[in-house]
């Protein structure tokens, strides 16, 4: 496993997708994630959380790409650590929101962008 994969796994584990949230999401989601996030009605708080998450992704994706291009990039590593810590602070809130099927589907649809852009 290369450094990128290891960092990605650690990040996903911190975000709660490795075990806990995957179980919740797996129970709530069908095998297909729909691509249009407009289909999922969210509460005001959920929408604010997702706006924060999408803004976070806008910072995280370039950091991951920079680290992948240059594994010794200290700034990218620092950004990844800081952004991962920030995501870790949302874990309980995310786990609560993931109990809502609409939120879980919306979240997985948005997260597809992260997956597509870093691979």
Image (cartoon, rainbow, N blue to C red):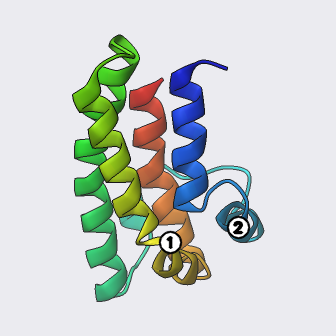
Left or right of residue 7: residue 68: left
How many neighbours does mark 1 have within 10 angstroms: few (below 14), some (14-19), or many (20 or more)?
some
Residue under the point 27% across and 26% down: 74
Left or right of residue 32: residue 73: left
User: Where residue 26 sits in the image (x, y, percent)?
Assistant: 74, 62
Q: Quadrant location of residue 47?
A: bottom left
The residue tagged 1 is 91
User: Where residue 63 sits in the image (x, y, percent)?
Assistant: 29, 33
Residue under the point 32% across and 86% down: 45
C-alpha gap between disc 2 and disc 1? 10 Å
Whether 6 is drawn above or below 97: the answer is above
How many neighbours does mark 2 have within 10 angstroms: few (below 14), some (14-19), or many (20 or more)?
some
Q: Secondary structure at mark 2?
A: helix
Whether 2 is drawn above or below 92: the answer is above
Residue under the point 32% across and 51% down: 83
The residue tagged 2 is 20
């Amino acid at each position: 496993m290369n450094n990128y994969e290891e960092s990605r796994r650690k990040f996903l584990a911190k975000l709660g997708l490795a075990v806990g949230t995957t179980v919740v999401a797996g129970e709530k989601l069908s095998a297909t994630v729909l691509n249009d996030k407009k289909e999922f009605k969210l509460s005001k708080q959920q929408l604010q959380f997702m706006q924060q998450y999408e803004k976070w992704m806008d910072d995280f994706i370039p950091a991951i790409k920079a680290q992948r291009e240059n594994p010794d990039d200290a700034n990218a590593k620092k950004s990844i650590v800081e952004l991962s810590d920030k995501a870790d602070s949302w874990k309980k809130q995310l786990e609560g929101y993931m109990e809502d099927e609409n939120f879980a589907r919306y979240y997985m649809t948005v997260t597809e962008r992260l997956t597509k852009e870093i691979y």
